[in-house]
Image: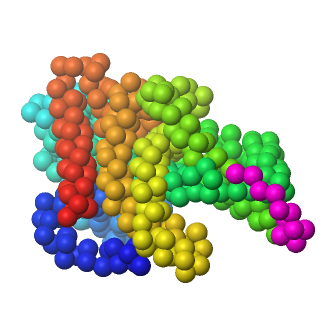
Amino acid sequence: MKGSHTYRNIRPALAKHKSLKRCLRALVFLVIIALLAPVLANDKPLVCRYQNTWLFPALSWKRTVVAGDTSLNYNMGKDWKYLDADIILFPPCAWSPTTLDADNAPRKSPFDKQWFSLGHGNTAPLPLAYRHWLGTTQNGQDVLSILIHGTAIAIGIGFASMLIAALIGVSLGAFAGYFSNNGLRLGPLQILALLAGIFFTYFYCCVIRGYKLAEAFNDGGIWLILRLLFLCYVALKTIGGMVWIAGYMERKLRIPYRFRFPLDTLVSKSIELLNSVPSLLLIIALSAFARPSYSLLIIIMGLLSWTIIARITRAEYLKAKNLEYVIAAKALGMKNRRILFRHILPNVMPLILTQLVFGMGSAVLAEASLSFLGIGIPLESASWGSLLNEGRDHFSSWWLVVFPGACLCLLMLLYNKTATELSGFRNS
């Protein structure tokens, strides 16, 4: 089958596209920076020898540790710099994004003199190891540390939101394109089971477990995404199981009636409805109903970004279902599920990946725009948009606009270049 051999020669073909390889390496480099952010920018030392005890604060999950006859709090922030340790080694950027340096507030430029408090009202020039290389914010937060930790937010929002969009868009687009309006037919018991399953899952998720879902939305975090994924899994398994049981009963009872399910029309009208509303305005409206959080923004952007992916997938499946390898698979008696995801999907995936990369860039830009307006993720979070928001109020502090703006532009250019090269790679 054609789909089984689509990716056999990826590495030789990728070797000819050096520009795409450079883009992918740059993206991997940014992912490494995002993963190693606590090691690259932290006010906790990487290694510390205090009272004959070796400590690794930046790499530890503990809150307190006993060194000799002293109990140290790992979250004591700037106080680590005053510790009289035998050996102490800080990360390249010796500040966390949440640490407030009152000695260098408000808004110290990268070229201003920076000071270090010695106690009793005495100050000294800030050592180079502790210097704020890209300046500070209104509260004395280190700009370089915020940029490093903001990389994780920028990469994470783009990847997670597009993963949600891909799951929805590819599934709906594939079924709509493959079955159209006449390919999927349901019996009367299956239709009743489908409606009953939707009602049951809604009642369970939104009524019985609604208070848990409300708590998850208020708390945010990874638990919100995991809870929603679990509820979606339960809903799909419940509805699918009820429809399968109803179909089994119809076969046993020999009920001949079948009604066509206009799946293609429903998906197309849903795409038109969502595309008729500006996404940014819809995100702002939905964000007003819950406290801003990182996970909530991911879910909202993912639920609003699937339409383009679904439209592309639908068009490709409409074209592919009439090709020879699909006709041959049907003649061999293969199940529709195998044809959909084992033979057609590998041929459509390069085009979907191109759109996903474009979508990641759009998601990063949307997050920065919302944070710039002050309604995205919480303002205390280390994001590039929060720096731009502060720079809007203090435009004379050029470093609050130039550095995050440059990072945002470079990431957008990288995403667009990668998507363009992926498109050329697909056509080669």
Task: Work out whether residue 97 or residue 53 is closer to the camera in this orientation and state it.
Answer: 97
Please report the residue visible at 34 percent of the width from the left and 50 percent of the height from the top. Answer: 355
Looking at this view, name the residue that lies furthest to the left: 111
Q: Is residue 22 above or below residue 416?
A: below
Horizontal side of residue 362 vs 197, given as left or right: left
Q: Is residue 65 left or right of residue 95?
A: right
Residue 409 pos. (x, y %): 21, 39
The reply to whether residue 105 is in sight is no
Q: Quadrant of the N terminus?
A: bottom left
> For this rendering, which residue is in front, 355 or 216?
355
Q: Which residues are magenta?
A: 250-260
Whether residue 189 is visible here, answered yes or no, is: yes
User: x and y percent of residue 375 in the render?
Assistant: 45, 28
- Percent across and percent down for residue 164 are 50, 51
Q: Is residue 201 magenta?
A: no
Describe residue 123's horizontal placement relative to residue 82 as left or right.
Answer: left
Residue 253 appears at what percent x and percent y? 90, 68
Nearer the observer, 389 or 418: 418
Q: Nearer the viewer, residue 158 or 2?
A: 2
